[in-house]
Amino acid sequence: MTAIDQTGSVGVDAEETRRARRERAERIGRWLLPLTIMSLAVLAWDRICVWNEIPHYILPRPGVVLQALVTDAPLLFSSLLVTLRITFLGLALAVVGGVGLAVLFAQSKWVEMSFFPFAVVLQVTPIVAIFPLINIYVDNQTAKLLLCAWIVAFFPILSNTTLGLNSADRNLRDLFALNGATRWQELRLLRLPAAMPYFLGGLKIAGGLALIGAVVAEFVAGAAGQSSGLASRIIEAGYRLNAPRLFAALILISATGIVIFLVLSLVSHLMLRRWHESALKQER
């Protein structure tokens, strides 16, 4: 709302000014607050090490970890590439398998009732319990890690996409049926667009889980050598009491997970910003 002052000029309503100021403060605080809290936590970590005279092989200071990150960068980043390759391949297979199976479920309730429980069993069984079986039946090391990452990332995409496909407006489905639309037309023009926000939500969850699955698979596989991932570097650093390298590897894994989440969130926003309510609100 706007108001006209005594000079006849159009002024901005006080409520709109307060709302704009509040939104600007929220935009700044969304980035500034986490950075401030993180900086304070790093400072507290450093002071605890200094005041308690903790040796670097027990708890290294942040500066020592940063130095290890720079010194061991060739080794750590080559391992990071191995972990990322498993993560993205596992995520891609999870997308293909999850969406394909969800479409199949949407076409037949009998198929969904028959096979969905198996997907739940895969989801609720810990990957460390499944890995001995995978280790028996699969010879290739990369295939083992890929299978573990896929199992962990598969279910969120399947579950969310199935929910989205089944959430299409029933009146519109009746309208499609009255107009003689085929199953393929109903799927392509109605159900898949309706399921897109659900799929993207599942994709954001699955991105982080694929990274977790890849790292856990490397742990239980116990792979070692130049082509090993970050988990193997963590195990190796632990055996050698090289705490700075261990912390540096952990920081790399955390940073990678954050970047994956941010990239997938950006993809979701770009795909939904013109038509879905959840993204439209972010632009107001």
Image (cartoon, rainbow, N blue to C red):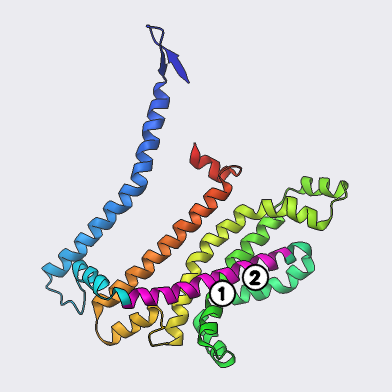
- Picture quadrant where residue 15 is located: top left
Query: Which mark is first along the chain, 2 or 1?
Result: 2
Residue topped by disc 1: 150
Question: Residue 168 location in percent, x, y?
Answer: 72, 51
Vertical placement of 247 versus 27: above or below? below
- 199 left or right of 57? right
Report which residue position mark 2 lands on: 97
What residue do we see at 63% from left, 66% from top? 158
Magenta part of the chain: 75-103
Residue at 84% across, 55% down: 182
SS type, badge 1: helix
Q: Look at label 2 and name its amino acid.
A: Gly
How packed mark 2 is, by other alpha carbons closer than 10 Å (few <14, some 14-19, many 20 or more), is some
Residue 55 can be seen, yes or no:
yes
Can the viewer see residue 126 in this picture?
no
Instruction: Measure how far apart labels 1 and 2 are at the Cα level.
Output: 9 Å
* Corner quadrant of residue 97: bottom right
- Number of marks in picture: 2
Q: Residue at x 27, y 52 (%)?
A: 36
